[in-house]
Amino acid sequence: MFINTQRFFLFLLFAACSLFSIFGCDSVNPSKILEDVTGPRTPTLAASSAVTSVSFQNDILPILTARCAFAGCHVAGGPDNLDFSTYQTLKKGGEDGPVVIPGNPDESDIIEEIVSGRMPPGGPPLTDAQIQLFIDWINEGAMDGQLGQPVQPIEQNTLIDDDDREDDDDDEDDEDDNEDDEDDDDHDDEDDEDDNEDEEDDDRDDDNDKDDEDD
C-alpha cells in the first residue's frame, strides 16, 4: 500500500514537472487573448479637420443683407467704415480693426454686438438660431464660399473638342475662300487692264489706217 502511494505521488510529481516545462515559460498575454477574441486591432487616423456646416454665402450673407448691409447702416461709407455687404469688406473690419476673428467668436466684436442686441439698431435682435450660425461660422474659420470652403477661381477649359475644331476649320476655309476671291478680283482687274490696253492699241491702228487712206 505504501509503495503504491509512493508511486502515485511520483507520477503526479512527474506530470507536474512535465506541464511546468511545457507551459511555465510561456506567460499569458492579456492583449493576445483580446486579439484572439476581437481580431487584430486596426489603427485609426484622427480626422484632420471637422466638416464645416455653415456657408457664408448661403447662411451669413443673407442675414447681413437683410438686417445690416443697407443704406444708412453697414455699407460702404457707413458708420465706423464697417461694410458688411461682401465677405472681403466684412473680414477687413472698420476703423477699430477686424470685427471677425476666425476660430474665436468670443473675441469677435460682431458676436458681442449681435448677442447684446445692439445690432441691428432700430430693429428686432437676431434670433438665437441666427446668432448660433454666426458663432458656428466663426468657429469653423469664418471661411467664404459654399459650406465654408474658400472660393476657387473658375479655370478656363483649354481643351478643344471636335465641334471647336470644326469651327476652326470652317473659319480657316472661309479665310481661304476670301483670299481666293481677292486673287480672282486681282486677276479680273489685270484682265480688264489688258483689255483696255488692247482696245487702245486697236484705236491707234484704226487711226493709222485712216491716215494712210487720207494720204
Image (tube, rainbow, N blue to C red):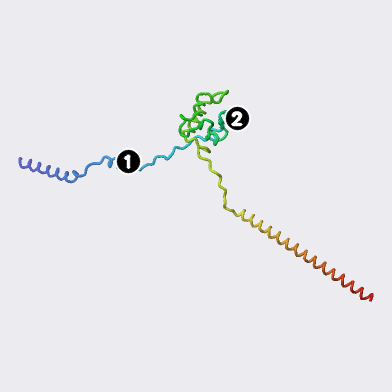
> Which residue does the image show at 53% across and 41% down from the upper left?
151
Question: Do residues under tags 1 and 2 come within 8 Å of each other at their CB atoms?
Answer: no
Where residue 210 sits, quadrant-wise, is bottom right
Image spot of residue 5 (x, y percent): 7, 40
Image spot of residue 199 (x, y percent): 84, 68
Where residue 36 sits, quadrant-wise, is top left
**Image side of residue 98 versus residue 194, left or right:** left
> Which residue does the image show at 42% across and 40% down from the upper left?
48
Three-letter amino acid code at the position of disc 1 = Thr
| Residue under pointer 1 | 38
Q: Report the Cα–Cα distance between label 1 and label 2.
A: 62 Å
Image spot of residue 76 (x, y percent): 59, 32
Which comes sooner in the sequence, label 1 or label 2?
Answer: 1
**Image side of residue 27 versus residue 144, left or right:** left
> Which residue does the image show at 48% across and 30% down from the upper left?
108
Q: Nearer the viewer, mark 1 or mark 2?
A: 2
Q: Residue furthest front?
A: 95
Q: Nearer the viewer, residue 65 or 205?
A: 205
Where residue 72 sits, quadrant-wise, is top right
Check the picture and name the quadrant holding the N terminus.
top left
Q: Element at badge 2?
A: loop
Q: Nearer the viewer, residue 153 or 130?
A: 153
Q: Element at badge 1?
A: helix
| Residue under pointer 2 | 70
> Which residue does the image show at 51% across and 40% down from the upper left?
150
